Image (spheres, grey):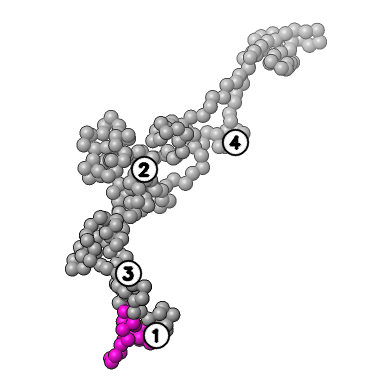
Amino acid sequence: MNEFLPFAEAENANLIPFSEWQNAAARLSGFSSGIARSNQINRAIAQGANISYAIAKFIERTLKEDVYVSQPDLLVDQFYRALLEMSYRTTPIGCILTFPVQVEIEGFVVSNFGGDLSRTDYDKLFAVYGTKFNVSSTPATKFGIPNLAYNFIEAAGQLAEIGCFVKAGLPNIPGGWLSVLAYNQKDSESPYSMIARFPDYIVTTKNSTGASWQNTTFSFNAGDLNPIYGSATTVQVSALRSLCLIRAY
C-alpha cells in the first residue's frame, strides 16, 4: 500500500505549459488574493505531489513496506532506512574500504587488527563471512574478521585462494664458489707465493714471510650496493598505510 499518488498525470491534464510556468508571476511571487488559474494551481500541486510520490515509491520498492500519508514520523524513519538499505547495495556487506585518515562511519567496523564479532549483533556480516577468519581462540558465539595489519590485498588467481593469507617470501638466491684453494707455493722467481684458485680465474700474490696456510674469507652485503636491502625484516614495498573498514550492517 502506497497512499502517496501522482497528481495530474493524465496526458491531457489541466496544467499550464512548463515554458509558461517558468516565468509566470504566480510562480515567482505566489498566488495573490482573487481568482487563481486552475492550470497554475495544478502545476504547483503536481510538483509537490509527484516528488512525494517518487520518494514514497522509492521507500515502497526498497523496503517492501506500506507507506501512509497519515504517519509522517514513520515516513521519516522509512525514508532513512530506505537510504541505508540502498547504501548496502552500493557497498555490500563484507566489502572493505580504505581511508588515509582515521574515521568512524556508521555501519562499518575497523579491520586493521582483526578480532571477533558477535554472531547475533552482526548477523548480516556473519552470513557473508561465516567462520572463514576464525582462529583457535574465537568463541563459539562469535566469528572472526580478517586481520589486515601489514597485509596487502591481492587479487586471487584461483577461487580457492580467495580469503587466504599468504606469508611474505622471496625466491631463494643460490650461489657460491665451487672450489677455492689457498696455499703458499715456492717457485723459482720468488721465495714464496699464494695462489687462490676460482672456477674461472687464478689470483697469485707474493709472500716473502715463509710457507704457511692462510685463511681466505669472502663476504657479501647487498646493503653496500643499495640501502633498500636491510631496511626491513620482511618483504616491504613502498606503501601508504591506511585504515581498513568493513561494511558490517
**Crowding near the residue tagged with mark 3, few <14, some 14–19, many ≥20 C-alpha atoms within 10 Å:** some
- Quadrant where the N terminus lies? bottom left
Main secondary structure along the magenta-highlighted residues: helix
Q: Say which residue label 2 marks.
A: 112
Mark seen at residue 226: 4
Q: Are marks 4 and 3 in contact (CB under 8 Å)?
A: no
Front-most of residues 1 and 187 = 1
Q: Say which residue label 3 marks.
A: 51
Which element is circle 4 on? loop
Which element is circle 2 on? loop
Chain-order first, disc 3 or disc 1: 1
Which element is circle 1 on? loop
Q: Position of residue 76 (x, y in %)?
A: 24, 64
Chain-order first, disc 2 or disc 3: 3
The three-letter code of the residue at mark 2 reads Asn
Distance from disc 1 to disc 2, alpha carbons, whole Å, reads: 59 Å
Q: Using the rendered view, name the quadrant where residue 116 is placed.
A: top left
* Horizontal relation, residue 152 to residue 29: left or right: right
Q: Is residue 91 magenta?
A: no
- Residue drawn 25% across and 55% down? 64
Q: Mark 2 or mark 3, which is nearer to you?
A: 3
Q: Using the rendered view, name the quadrant where residue 192 is placed.
A: top right
Q: Mark 1 or mark 4, which is nearer to you?
A: 1
Q: Mark 4 or mark 2, which is nearer to you?
A: 2
Mark seen at residue 24: 1
Q: Position of residue 233 (x, y in %)?
A: 47, 33
Which stretch did the figure color magenta?
Answer: 25-44
